[in-house]
Amino acid sequence: MKTLLIAFLIFFYFLPTIVGRKKSNAGAIFALNFFLGFTLIGWVVSLVWALTNDNKPQTIIVNNNIPDNIHQTTNDVSNKIAEKRRELYGDLNRIKSLHDQNIISEEIYNQQKDSLLNKIDILSHNESGVSVLSEQQIQHPVYIPERKKSTIWIWALVLLLLAIIFYLLYYKGIIFSDNHKQDKEAITNQIEKTYFDITNDSYNYHAGSETPFYNLNSGEALAMRFVSIIALLSGSAKMEAKNIDVYNFIDSSSAQVKYDLVREIKNVKDTLHIDMIAKKIGGDWKLDGQKAFGDDKEEQNKPKVKGNETNYALPSNADNDDNLINKSLLNSSEHAAYKVTYYNDTDNDSSGQAETDDRYLILGYKKIYMIVNKEVVKVWHEKKYIQEDESYITETKEGDTFTQQFDDFDIDYKSGKIIHYSCNDIPLNEVQVQDRFLK
């Protein structure tokens, strides 16, 4: 189908050349079509040019009666021409003799010889013009513009037909169509239906093929059951997927999808940002059971407290080569590193507290890395950089906003949470990172 489409487009592009291929100026039409056809104006001009008629002269023979003395006149002219030619050849022999005797130079000889030969050519041409005047007819060519039947309406009909065919191919989705349109709709419908059915207790919650999930374990199945029970008892629990975006097809049976999962229990709402891979299994699209219930990147990177020890979960894309730290960055003097000494979580502790972990912020290569205990726990990608007075504001593609003032940072998360970090500026080579986070 792609080959057919390419062939059709090439044919359509060079249509002016094809139409005007038999015209006297076909080469000029081709040049205009080839070099300026892509501008549309050039294509239209070359097509109109190809459709115009050539004014080719048509020779009409007109018969005239010739006077009786035409033969005598013709003979007199021929004799005079012959006599003059003999004189010129005699002059040519004389200058050659003078040249051979070294009486005239080579230059003068060549000039006179060229002049005599030119006169002889003119005589020969005039002699050929004295044609068969002894015949009873003489031919006078009269040029009358040839009337050529117009073919503009034929080509207009062809163009209209091609336009109709092109529109039908596009309408049927054969060309310039989204090859995954039906799959995108199927995935979107599956996601919406899944959370609706969970809320309405439509699944048996076994990690088998009957559920719209793959990679489902007993923990996720229990979470599904819990939501259903709450919904049945209170009548006010629900889950709903919004802003569904199927943004990349890995292959015909795997697609990356992201959406906002809105959970509401007894009028208390929260939103999780889901990013997962949907897979086509047995002809149906299924969701990742490990991520369908809140594997949010922001939630992943919140500290998980166990006793007096604080552990930080790695980002889901930590193994993505794009998020690894280039070793050259750690030896660069053009970028900055900041060691966190004090932070203030506005949601939990208004007075703030000292940082007990080895936490760093690295700014470089349009990315911001957060490193905790030698591990990369978060990566932001710069979207927009703004300077306002003494503050530097970085808007990230992840939706979070950094405001830097001297060595202090405020991270305004898209969830509404704000964390203030007080830092010390340090050389980049003092930051220690595990090798698995380097490239």
Image (spheres, rainbow, N blue to C red):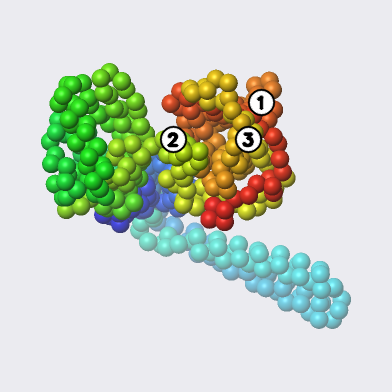
Q: Is 127 drawn above or below residue 184 in the view shown?
A: below
Query: Element at badge 2?
Result: helix
Q: Is 103 drawn above or below residue 137 in the view shown?
A: below
Residue 193 coordinates in the image, percent (x, y):
18, 35
Q: Amino acid at mark 2?
A: Glu
Badge 3 crowding class, 10 Å Cα cut-off, few under 14, some 14 to 19, many 20 or more, is many
Residue 190, which numbered label?
A: none
At a point 26% along the width and 43% down the height, the residue shown is: 219
Give the quadrant of residue 426.
top right
Gap in angstroms between the C-alphas marked 2 and 3 = 19 Å
Q: Is residue 184 left or right of residue 84?
A: left
- Label 2 close to label 1 by CB (< 8 Å): no
Residue 298, which numbered label?
A: 2
Gap in angstroms between the C-alphas marked 2 and 1 = 24 Å
Give the quadrant of residue 315.
top left
Earlier in the chain: of badge 2 and badge 1, it is: 2
Query: Element at badge 1?
Result: strand
Name the quarter where the N terminus is drawn.
bottom left
Q: Amino acid at mark 3?
A: Val
Residue 85 coordinates in the image, percent (x, y):
63, 69
Q: Is 282 drawn above or below residue 149 in the view shown?
A: below
Q: Nearer the viewer, residue 151 or 302?
A: 302
Q: Is residue 80 left or right of residue 194?
A: right
Residue 247 coordinates in the image, percent (x, y):
35, 41
At a point 81% along the width and 68% down the height, the residue shown is: 108
Q: Which residue is mark 1?
A: 405
Q: Amino acid at mark 1?
A: Gln
Res. 26 in view: yes
Gap in angstroms between the C-alphas marked 1 and 3 = 14 Å
Q: Which residue is mark 3?
A: 340
Q: Is residue 367 left or right of residue 217?
A: right
